[in-house]
């Protein structure tokens, strides 16, 4: 899985940094958000749902066992 | 680092701004109290319900009464479901919940949460009543994705002072009374010392992180939020309050909600109305559930049929699981409309929103895939909400612990039934009110004990200065290893003694280190995990027998040690607390309420 910030779209509101319950995001020296602790993400989705600029995606590989895996129906 | 200290004062201090904490704060504020909420994350999206709940439940007079289903009937049915027949709970809490559930649920509407008024619904008040049978007799689908956003807005409007990113690390004590708490502000590197007449613990009580992660490689440890480290219980223990049912808090060694997201109550639940379960060849093993027409004169009988299908389904699934056969959630027969409904419900169910977004981003049609199911046993404490209802902090019916000035609410409570969203909301509200009502007779908290504050400050400074010490993560892993190996049933004196010795050793030898505020916060979490693990193993040692259906016990020769009580009535709830540097135990009588023959609904279905 990956937390991806599209800096082209990001408006620097810092909501993701403010709200993420796991402190996955942090601010760099210039005050810009970046993904610091991806491994702490519990996939709650809050950052993506609240990002006002549609700049943030939390992607997970839907085929990776054992979290999610699929089987085509017979 | 120069850690700052800030002093604050309130009438009521709430620790944890989740569903229960927010409600407690709002209720106390409504009584005129000055309220502070300490939230270690950010109230807008914190806690188990941070990204939403899709269903709730409760006694809804407009829906239930016309069908002849009385509150008393529901009290019995919920008692059955919450294992009150076992003697480890107090059914009075469920009764209290049902008395207030309608008012509390519909009360959410004033904060902007849509609970009823769904125009497609044929039910009274247009509730979306669904056959989601992990609550009996049915659940209510709500538009709950932003429930925390709504509560956070209400807190602000009401004038509750919310301190986000402040983690409570110790309760202040003056004599026999709790007089507030010391918090650590992880993003400011400051101690926040709050004196209060009443303190309410509402940190959710779960401590999933005590056990090894189920899905390590998958970036997701089972079901836990960051908060799953038993903060409230550790704080309570430190202040001399009682924890109950801790001897079986581990259930089967750890919780086993593999694939929880997909489970989501399948085949009903969030997958209603089209979810069904199929085997390897695609044969339908458990069929879909349907909502019964409310105007049908045989409403309950038909609903009961559905309930039967659901329970039979669980049994079939368990049977398959015990044979090691794989089953799949199957939505291939869903209509467009049904699929749209399912996706709406998924969008309100916590992390399932993100799952839905990822599916859509890859254009995956849920009808064209089958999802492997991993189930846990129904009767086990591993069921999160049931488990949380059984183990936790012991309070009286006004949510007051045995320590003056200290209350608890929400999933934090022990021996109080299954505590998911609606009971959390309800108990939070009632606890806030109860605490506020006692303010007049509560003494002024006075000045905090400087020595206690200095001790906590010393810990923080020590951890910053430690260069070669242990990271919080490494300590957490050691706790998990101990619990993983020695906490799995069958329990025995030998295993529990070994665990206690290893944990005491870990506590003594650990020199926690940290480089920033975030890591300081984690060191306090690691400490709490050790305390929780110790409490669990001490309770196991105290209860020198099997506790069915939760665990077996063997003696040093490997022979089974059965339970002494032959009937639930003979059982006692075990409470553990700290006293004079050691542990002390007491036993409480549970209250039993359940129909021996099972659910009223099932009965009427067979009768
Ligand atoms: C993904 C998911 C989906 C769910 N869906 C449903 C559903 O659809 N229906 C349903 O009925 N139930 C559902 N539940 C269960 C329900 O969300 C919980 O039962 C409920 O949130 C418990 O409320 P609470 O207030 O006791 O705890 P929480 O809401 O978890 O709040 C606890 C709060 O305490 C804070 N905290 C912890 N430690 C500290 C500390 N030391 N200092 C300060 N703050 C602290 C946390 O950050 C958190 O905000 C779901 C749970 C999950 C995880
Ligand atoms: S929430 Fe979105 S726009 Fe705001 S800082 Fe984060 S990524 Fe940027
Ligand atoms: S999904 Fe949740 S835990 Fe993960 S980064 Fe976003 S807000 Fe944080």
Image (spheres, coloured by chain):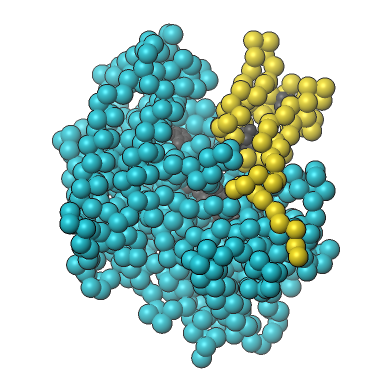
| Image position, residue B573 (x, y; %) | 26, 59
Q: Quadrant of residue B271?
A: bottom right
Front-lying residue, B33 or B540 = B540
**Is any part of residue B217 visible from this angle?**
yes
Front-lying residue, A33 or B401 = A33
In this view, B59 is above or below B575: below
Position of B290 with respect to B594 (left or right) is right
Position of B50 with respect to B256 (left or right) is right
Position of B503 with respect to B62 (left or right) is left
Q: How many marks?
A: 0
Q: Quadrant of residue B549?
A: bottom left
Position of A57 with respect to B286 (left or right) is right
**Quarter of the image where the N terminus of chain B is located:** top left
Q: Residue at the location (80% across, 55% down)?
A: B365
| Image position, residue B67 (x, y; %) | 60, 81
**Is any part of residue B13 visible from this angle?**
no
Please tell me in which quarter of the rendered image ligand 3 is found.
top right
| Image position, residue B178 (x, y; %) | 30, 35
| Image position, residue B247 (x, y; %) | 29, 52
Q: Residue at the location (68% across, 24% down)?
A: A14
Q: Residue at the location (32% across, 55% down)?
A: B489
Q: Residue at the location (21% across, 43% down)?
A: B497
Front-lying residue, B300 or B159 = B300
**Residue that protrudes farthest toward the left in the picture:** B580
Which shade of the palette goes to chain A? yellow
Front-lying residue, B14 or B208 = B208
Q: Which chain is cyan?
A: B
């Amino acid at each position: 899985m990956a937390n991806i910030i599209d800096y082209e779209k990001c408006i620097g509101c810092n909501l993701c940094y403010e709200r993420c319950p796991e402190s996955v995001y942090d601010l760099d020296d210039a005050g810009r958000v970046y993904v610091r602790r991806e491994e702490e993400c519990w996939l709650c989705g809050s950052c993506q749902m609240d990002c006002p600029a549609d700049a943030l995606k939390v992607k997970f590989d839907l085929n990776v066992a054992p979290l999610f895996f699929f089987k085509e129906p017979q | 680092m120069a850690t700052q200290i800030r002093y604050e004062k309130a009438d009521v201090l709430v620790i944890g701004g989740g569903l229960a904490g927010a409600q407690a704060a709002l209720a106390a504020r409504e009584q005129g109290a000055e309220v502070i909420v300490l939230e270690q994350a950010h109230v807008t999206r914190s806690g188990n319900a941070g990204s939403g709940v899709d269903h709730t439940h409760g006694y809804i007079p407009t829906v239930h009464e016309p069908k002849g289903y009385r509150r008393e009937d529901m009290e019995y049915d919920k008692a059955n479901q919450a294992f009150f027949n076992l003697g480890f709970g107090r059914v009075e809490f469920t009764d209290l919940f049902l008395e207030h559930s309608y008012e509390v649920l519909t009360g959410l509407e004033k904060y902007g949460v849509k609970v009823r008024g769904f125009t497609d619904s044929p039910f009274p008040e247009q509730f979306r009543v669904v056959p989601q049978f992990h609550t009996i007799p049915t659940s209510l689908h709500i538009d709950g994705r932003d429930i925390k956003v709504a509560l956070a807005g209400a807190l602000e409007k009401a004038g509750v002072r919310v301190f986000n990113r402040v983690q409570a690390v110790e309760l202040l004590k003056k004599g026999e009374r709790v007089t507030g708490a010391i918090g650590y502000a992880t993003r400011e590197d400051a101690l926040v010392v709050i004196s209060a007449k009443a303190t309410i613990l509402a940190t959710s009580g779960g401590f999933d992180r005590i056990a090894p992660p189920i899905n390590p490689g998958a970036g997701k440890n089972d079901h836990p939020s960051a908060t799953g480290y038993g903060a409230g219980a550790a704080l309570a223990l430190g202040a001399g309050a009682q924890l109950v049912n801790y001897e079986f808090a581990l259930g089967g060694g750890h919780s086993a909600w593999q694939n929880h997201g997909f489970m989501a109550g399948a085949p009903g639940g969030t997958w209603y109305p089209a979810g069904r379960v199929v085997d390897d060849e695609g044969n339908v093993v458990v069929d879909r559930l349907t909502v019964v027409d409310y105007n049908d004169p045989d409403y309950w009988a038909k609903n009961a049929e559905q309930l039967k299908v659901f329970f039979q389904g669980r049994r079939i699934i368990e049977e398959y699981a015990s044979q090691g056969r794989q089953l799949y959630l199957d939505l291939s027969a869903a209509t467009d409309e049904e699929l749209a409904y399912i996706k709406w419900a998924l969008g309100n169910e916590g992390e399932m929103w993100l799952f839905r977004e990822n599916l859509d981003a890859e254009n995956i049609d849920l009808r064209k895939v089958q999802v492997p199911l991993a189930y846990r046993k129904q009767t086990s404490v591993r069921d999160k909400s049931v488990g949380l209802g059984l183990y936790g902090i012991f309070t009286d019916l006004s949510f007051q612990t045995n320590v003056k000035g200290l209350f608890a609410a929400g999933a934090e409570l022990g021996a109080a039934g299954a505590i998911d969203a609606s009971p959390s909301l309800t108990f939070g509200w009632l606890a806030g009110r109860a605490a506020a009502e006692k303010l007049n007779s509560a003494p002024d908290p006075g000045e905090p004990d400087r020595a206690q504050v200095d001790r906590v400050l010393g810990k923080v400074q020590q951890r910053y200065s430690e260069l070669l010490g242990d990271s919080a993560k490494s300590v957490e892993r050691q706790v998990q290893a101990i619990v993983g190996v020695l906490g799995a049933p069958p329990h025995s004196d030998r295993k529990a003694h070994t665990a206690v010795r290893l944990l005491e050793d870990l506590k003594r030898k650990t020199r926690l280190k940290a480089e920033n505020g975030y890591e300081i916060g984690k060191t306090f979490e690691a400490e709490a995990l050790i305390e929780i693990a110790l409490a669990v193993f001490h309770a196991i040692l105290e209860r020198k027998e099997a506790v069915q259906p939760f665990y077996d016990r063997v003696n040093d020769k490997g022979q089974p040690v059965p339970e002494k009580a032959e009937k639930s009535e003979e059982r006692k709830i075990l409470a553990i607390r700290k006293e004079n540097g050691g542990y002390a135990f007491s036993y409480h009588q549970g209250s039993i309420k359940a129909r021996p023959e099972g659910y009223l609904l099932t009965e009427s279905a067979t009768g």
